[in-house]
Image (spheres, grey):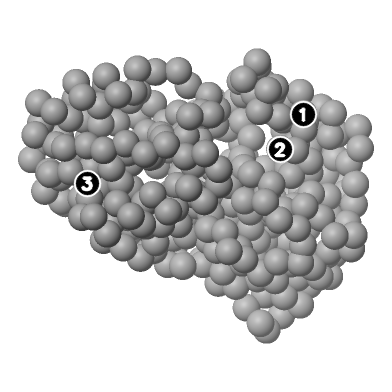
Amino acid sequence: MLQEMQKRAKPASIHVIVNPATGKRVPLIHTLNEILRPAGIRFEVSVTHEFGDGANAARKAVERGADVVACFGGDGTVMDVSEGLLKSDVPLLILQGGTGNLVAKELDLPKELTKSLQRITGDEFNTRRLDVGHLGKYPFLLRAGCGFETDVLQDASRELKKQFGRWAYAFAAAKALQEVSVAKYRITIDDEREVYAEAVACVIANTGAFGVGSLTLSPGIEIDDGKLDLILIRQADVEGIFSLVRMMMGDEPKGEEAAVVDASHLVGRWQVKKVKIETDPILPVQVDGDVLTETPQTAEVLPGALEVVV
């Protein structure tokens, strides 16, 4: 962690933005009332129906003077709500409600709704400023990319995730492995350097979380270092991808042997402030777990653009 934590006084009001399609079933309103009312914190709730609703609700909450904006959902909901808070002085409280919740995991936030809310009910609470990646019109806290991971996300449908939870990613990965495809990449780094390569996956990472299971790209990737990490995985890494499936299914080393992609499997890794990705053929692009656009795309980092309750 490069950025120091900041102290804030207990909020007088909080606006909670809820994705009703989230994977978790909890008595949300009851819990909000049970935890926040005794602490003297007023709360309002908005519900999203489609992508973009979270950002709009967050902007309106800031305009109305909310001291904290919370989101209940998965990483896609976090991304959506974050867009409405970029460069504001209103912190985001993440309430885990999705299948993966990798942003919360990256920040070591509690899984339980009650414990998450209790972080703001004392006299003071802690916040941390995070970098935000921006690809086209989409912000991202975790990563954006194309290739193998995007194939997995497309195959892991909402219905499959509802039925099997995180195992849906393992099933989708096993299917994607049968059709691993190679693309030609032209990458322009910081408007200065060009890289040409053939690869099965390209990841633009703001954190080390890979996006499926608990796989970590590298322990050296920081969410507040003012840069993004660009990683290409080559065709010869198919054996490494098979190990990803095992890790996604929960068969992972613990402690110091926690899952990390070995650098020998990588075509390359570069730290960048701005990167343009062009591919042949054109590929779909995922942003924090949702497939939203396609190549070519340009991504850049917005240093310290989002304040989060930690």
Q: Is residue 131 left or right of residue 91?
A: right
How many residues crowd around disc 2 within 10 Å: few (fewer than 14), some, or many (20 or more)?
Answer: many
Q: Is residue 308 left or right of residue 299?
A: left
Residues at discs 2 and 1 in contact (Cβ within 8 Å): yes
Q: CA distance from mark 3 to mark 2?
A: 33 Å
Q: Nearer the viewer, mark 3 or mark 2?
A: 2
Q: Position of residue 34 (x, y in %)?
A: 19, 21
Tally the marks: 3
Q: Position of residue 53 (x, y in %)?
A: 48, 47
Q: Amino acid at mark 1?
A: Ala
Residue at image point 84% right, 34% down: 176
**Which picture quadrant has residue 177?**
top right
How many residues crowd around disc 3 within 10 Å: few (fewer than 14), some, or many (20 or more)?
Answer: some
- Comparing 213 with 239, the one in front is 213
- Comparing 171 with 223, the one in front is 171
Q: Secondary structure at mark 3?
A: strand
In this figure, which residue is indicated by the disc labeled 3?
Answer: 126
Sequence order check: which comes first, mark 3 or mark 2?
Answer: 3
Q: CA distance from mark 2 to mark 1?
A: 7 Å
Residue at image point 20% right, 50% down: 67
In this figure, which residue is indicated by the disc labeled 1?
Answer: 172
In this figure, which residue is indicated by the disc labeled 2?
Answer: 153
- Comparing 208 with 128, the one in front is 128
Residue 131 in sight: yes
Q: Amino acid at mark 2?
A: Leu
Q: Position of residue 85 (x, y in %)?
A: 37, 57
Q: Amino acid at mark 3?
A: Asn
**Which picture quadrant has residue 169?**
top right
